Amino acid sequence: MRLSTKLFLAFLPAVIAVMAGLFLVAIDAFEDGLLRGHHAHLERVLTALQQVEAPATLPPAATKRDPAQAEPATGAQEKGGGQAADGGGTGWLSRGIGDHLDPDPGTREGALALAWQQIVLREERHLTVLRSDGTLIMSTMRGGRDYEALWRDLLDGRNPASPPLAGVAPLPGRSVPYVAGGYPAYGWMLVVSAPRDTVALALKRLEWWILGIGAALSMLLLGLAWLLARRLILRPVAVLERAAGDIAAQRQVQRIPVRGRDELAALARALEEMAADLAAAFGAVRRERDMNAVLMSSAPAAVAVLDADRRILQCNGRFAQAFGAAAVSRPIAEMVAAPAERQEAEAHFADTRPPVREFQLPGGADSAVFAWTIAPLPPGSEPSAPGMAAPAFIATGLDVTARHRAEAARRALQAELEHRERLETLGTFAGGIAHDLNNILTPVVGYVRMAEERLQAAAPAEGAAEDDAALADYLERIRRAADRARYVIRQILTFGRKVGPEAELMDLAEAVGDSLDLELPESETGIALVRDLPDDAAARPMVNADPVQLHQVLSNLISNARHAMPEGGEIRVSVGVEQEIAGKDGPWALLQVSDSGTGMPAEVAARIFEPFYTTKRTGRGTGLGLSVVHGIVGAHGGRIDVTSRPGAGTTFAIRLPLAGTVAAPGAAAPVPTARPADEDGHEVALPPGLRVLVVDDETEPRELALAVLVQAGCRARGATGGAEALALLQGEPAAAQTQLLLTDLTMPGMGGRELAAEVGRRRPGLPVVAMTGGPQEPEAADRFAAWLAKPFAPEDLRAALGRALAGKRMQG
């Protein structure tokens, strides 16, 4: 049912009730007016009757009569007259009063009747005459005597002198208006009343008029109410209905054409505000939805929407890229975890709020790793498409593969650093031991050499030739042992990187080929040496390396491989170019030495580069070979790695900085200007009387040097430290100043470097020769005229001093 019909039905009873009330009020008002009109007219008639003058004389017949003989007007006499019963005038009573009667003016009644006819004319009015005691004299009403008691009750207590009385007489079956007043001339009471039919007819006509007017007014009011309701209610409600529909359909609503101060206008303003708020809210929702879609599509994390069974309903682009578009409708645990972790993944995703857990994708050790978490969606989430399950959870996975690999690289680098630190510590320790051993070995080597020289210079005595030969043999054995000790000490210094390489640009494949020609004697037929050296010039790497140390590296590795194959096998040596390796920039020159020997477990492989660590039985090695290899490779700026398994052989991979290829060689490395003293092939004769100051805190090396110098004809003296040497130089006379200074580098207090710097300031031009049990230091070459390595022979000392003097002469 439409609102207009509802409003019409709602207004109709109200209009009917209002009109009924108005009708009743109008009837009462008109009836009161009608009665007042009748009363006014009747009062005028009564006043006219009261003014009728009575006759001066009465006829005889009108004399006193017995009141008992009077006959009031009968019912047949009501209309047109009645008969008198008082006053002797029998004519009015006998003939009655009416249009067809001729009243007798000679009687009281006749005079009154005549006046009545003249006043009333043709109007239908009734006159009732009563004595002062209430008895009826005459009445024009039909059955007038029947109402005697009624009139008497109505006029009770009134006399002819009383003012007129107006009212409504309740006659049987009717009510008639009347006016009663006195007739003083005779002492009668006159009652003038309107006939019943006249009042009833007037009232009926009045009721029909009022009913018709009320019906017309009702229809008019209903029409006006309809028009007003349509204009003021229905049209605004229809506008509000359309606006509400637009708001529900999320269409834009800017202004609702309903204005005013009533409730509908307030509702329109509220709808406008609600439309604006909803438009803003819908816009925010759309923007948030679009932003979420962009975030979902562009997020670096893999995001999947799951149903209650943890099956994938939707996923973003990153998830599809990592797991494929076919992942939809499959269990997430099956997609994101390797088979070994499948049960753990199912338990993880079965939890509603689990902690972050990392799973590696199926595909092996190099597969990606994602960190996963799952969270429940708000209840009441609806499917995104018909027929789909309702979303219940959202799973988010962050690719942490790079972090995992970085952590693995960091752990490997940390292990390598720890390994390098351990080797560095051992190298420092080994360098210190080598320095001390050189100091100990120096007098052995020197005195043996001096003994051999003396034995050779002495003339053989008779019978002593055999003893001299035996003594020479003893000295030779001591010298060979000392030389072997010198070699071991040099290896220790090489491991500790105390002996630097003399690098030169070389073809690595060619250098390796030349070194392999010297390896594996022909008698070792059980071992096959396979060379995998490139022929293409573009694949043959160039490196800056020391050829002697490179040969030592290759020799040590092949020796280690040979000892790992006691029953024979294969040794493969390969050279190539490697662009990059994990944790290091490339490219690299790669040298690999592999064997098919017994291999070694991981715990042994982790310690093979430590000095003096060996798995060989006693007498088969010193444990310094691989340590020396590690030191040489590190000194060249490279790295060495080992791969081995028990029973599967061992592979050593050496990576050196690439200096180009044979087809495109790079620049050669700078060659150190300083050269070891013991590699100079000539010996310079020392001038007699050369004044030399020898400074060393170790007694034996210092005494040996002094002995050699004295034997060579020099004037030598010694000092135990830098401060003592400066004091000696300070106190020398000008004619006997020291001409050459020989100092050890490592001394307590002032060392050899500080002493050389101070001497350079105090005695410029005084040659200083460095004596050390370690390697020479190229960065300090400008402070020293020559280098002397411990242990040294007498000829090594004389050669170093000769080079220092020769350099001074060239500068002069």
Image (tube, rainbow, N blue to C red):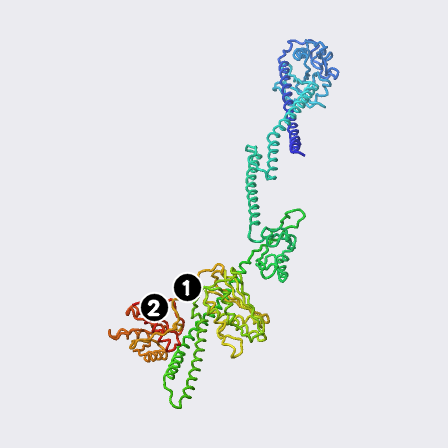
Residue that sits furthest to the bottom in the current view = 463
Task: State whether residue 180 appears in this view.
Answer: no
Q: Position of residue 22 (x, y in %)?
A: 64, 26
| Circle number at residue 169 | none
Question: Toward the viewer: 755 or 658?
Answer: 658
Question: Toward the viewer: 45 or 252?
Answer: 252
Q: Kindly report which numbered mark, 2 or 1, lies closer to the viewer in this rendering.
A: 1
Task: State whether residue 17 appears in this view.
Answer: yes
The residue indicated by pointer 2 is 783
Quarter occupied by residue 282:
top right
Q: Quadrant of the N terminus?
A: top right
Local SS, label 1: loop
Q: Position of residue 785 (x, y in %)?
A: 34, 70
Q: Which residue lies at the image location 31% right of the left edge and 69% below the top edge? A: 808
Q: Position of residue 679 (x, y in %)?
A: 40, 72
Does residue 51 appear to the left or right of 793 in the view shown?
right
Q: Position of residue 243 (x, y in %)?
A: 59, 36
The amino acid type found where label 1 is placed reads: Pro
Tally the marks: 2
Q: Which residue lies at the image location 59% right of the left edge and 30% below the top edge? A: 232
Alpha-carbon span between mark 2 and mark 1: 20 Å
Quarter occupied by residue 155:
top right
Q: Residues within 10 Å of mark 2 (few under 14, many from 20)?
A: some
The amino acid type found where label 2 is placed reads: Arg
Question: Toward the viewer: 494 or 400?
Answer: 494
N-terminal of the two: label 2 or label 1? 1
Compared with 586, 272 (above or below) is above
Compared with 188, 617 (above or below) is below
Q: Quadrant of the C terminus?
A: bottom left
Does residue 150 appear to the left or right of 769 in the view shown?
right
Local SS, label 2: helix
The residue indicated by pointer 1 is 670
